[in-house]
Image: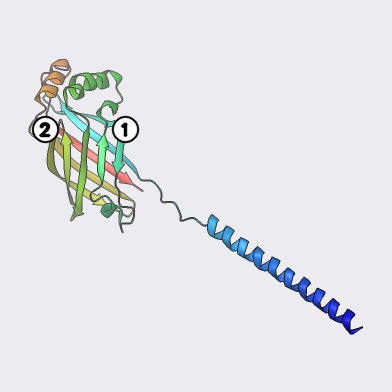
């Protein structure tokens, strides 16, 4: 009788022990599954735009446009503010993507102006401080440091400034070609300064 009782006791102990192991294994698997499915929250990509304003006629009438293909690289996603994250960030503007919402004008800009320049437009941002940022801008194969003004909030940075395609980037060939092609429409006057407005948002 004692042997029978001892046998049942051992069977019961084994059954309980096996049951505990299954629960423990289940908990371990659940923990592993939780670890595998837990991911860091994805950061939202920045959106950005560039608007240029060129000028024509003696009255200096503005003509606005943009570029459809712009790349923003090396943004510091760990920075404490959007403006700080753009310090040392680089950009590439593909000039063949110029868009003034006028196909005929865009054709002339591509064929007469940008086709007579070296490469695309690219550059990098310096430090954003006290409403001023210095930008290294490369255009027509020439790099210039230009000072732009900016305003910043938690969600956006707006940058404004101007360049002179002749004085800054020696783009005489491109400028003269465009001026001749548009001489009548421009009433004999094409201006070499261009205003730039950039907005970057998160």
Answer left or right for 33 relative to 80: right
Where residue 161 appears, as percent x and y from the top left, is 17, 41
From this view, report whether residue 57 is shown above or below residue 28.
above
Q: Earlier in the sequence, mark 1 or mark 2?
A: 1
From this view, report whether residue 94 is shown above or below residue 73.
above
Q: Which residue is mark 2?
A: 169
Badge 2 crowding class, 10 Å Cα cut-off, few under 14, some 14 to 19, many 20 or more, is some
Q: Secondary structure at mark 1?
A: loop
Residue 183 image-quadrant placement: top left
Q: Which residue is mark 1?
A: 69
Where residue 65 appears, as percent x and y from the top left, is 26, 30
Residue at the spot x=23%, y=22% of the render?
110
Q: Quadrant of the N terminus?
A: bottom right
From this view, report whether residue 9 is shown above or below residue 92.
below
Where residue 196 appears, as percent x and y from the top left, is 20, 37
Farthest residue in the right direction?
1
From the viewer's side, name the closer residue of 62 and 154.
154
Badge 1 crowding class, 10 Å Cα cut-off, few under 14, some 14 to 19, many 20 or more, is some
Q: Secondary structure at mark 2?
A: loop
């Amino acid at each position: 009788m004692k042997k029978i009782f001892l046998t049942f006791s051992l069977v019961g102990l084994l059954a309980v022990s096996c049951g505990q192991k299954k629960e423990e294994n289940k908990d371990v698997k659940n923990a592993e599954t939780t670890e595998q499915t837990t991911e860091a929250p994805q950061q939202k990509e920045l959106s950005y735009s560039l608007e240029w304003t060129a000028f024509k006629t003696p009255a200096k009438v503005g003509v606005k446009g943009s570029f459809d293909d712009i790349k923003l690289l090396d943004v510091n996603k760990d920075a404490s503010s959007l403006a700080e994250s753009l310090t040392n960030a680089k950009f590439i503007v593909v000039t063949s993507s110029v868009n003034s919402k006028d196909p005929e004008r865009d054709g002339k800009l591509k064929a007469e102006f940008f086709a007579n320049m070296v490469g695309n437009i690219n550059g990098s941002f310096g430090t954003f401080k006290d409403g001023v940022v210095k930008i290294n801008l490369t255009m027509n194969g020439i790099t210039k440091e230009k000072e732009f003004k900016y305003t910043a909030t938690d969600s956006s940075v707006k940058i404004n400034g101007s360049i002179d395609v002749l004085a800054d980037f020696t783009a005489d060939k491109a400028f003269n070609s465009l001026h001749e092609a548009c001489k009548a429409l421009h009433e004999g006057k094409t201006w070499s300064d261009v205003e730039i407005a950039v907005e970057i948002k998160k």
